[in-house]
Amino acid sequence: MTGLWVTVLAGTGACLGLKVLGTYVPRTWLEKAKVARLMGLVTVALLAALMAVQAAGDGQGLRLDARLAALAVAAIALWRRLPFIVVVILAAATAAGLRALGIG
């Protein structure tokens, strides 16, 4: 258990250090169009990776279940530009329906 806490504290320190170092980046660098675009793309990539891990991850492997189907339904609903509450309801109903059928 001690090793876990050391890892958590080390990660916390690394995040804090990066945040502090970020305050020393000159503002002119951040105002460049390429940097602003890259920052937006990195944010989207990180969120997409998090969603993929949460939807298909199962410890050390992959698990294809109702979560992945719900994510696909949500992606299609967002692509069709449906209101966000409708996206959430459709995804939840998909996952609930598949789990009620014993799939996932």
Image: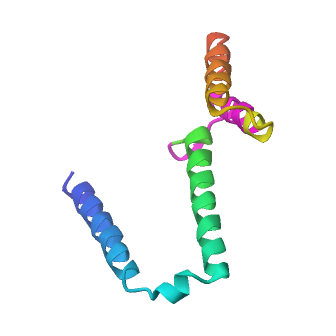
Give the residue drawn at x 68%, y 23%: 90
| Front residue of 48 and 61 | 48
Q: What's the image's color scheme?
A: rainbow
Residue 102: image x %, image y %? Answer: 64, 13
| Residue range of the region highlighted in magenta in the rendering | 59-75
Vertical side of 94 occupied by 3: above or below: below
Which x, y percent locates residue 91?
A: 65, 27
Which residue is painted at 29% across and 64% down in the image? 12
Is 71 left, or right, of 57 in this rendering?
right
Residue 83 falls in which quadrant of the image?
A: top right
* Vertical position of residue 40 compared to residue 26: above or below: above
Q: Which residue occupies 53% across, 81% down?
A: 30
Number of dots carrying numbers: 0
Residue 62: x %, y % from top left: 62, 42
Nearest the eye: 74 or 35: 35
Which residue reaches farthest top?
100
Q: Nearer the viewer, residue 60 or 78?
A: 78
Q: Residue furthest right?
A: 80
Q: In which quadrant will I find the C terminus?
A: top right
Would you place residue 4 above or below residue 40 in this image?
above
Point out the residue furthest to the left here.
2
- The residue nearer to you, when weighing 26 against 76, is 26
Above/below status of 45 relative to 30: above
Is 102 magenta? The answer is no
In the displayed structure image, the side of residue 3 where residue 18 appears, left or right: right
Magenta stretch contains residue 65? yes
Residue located at (67% from left, 17% from top): 98
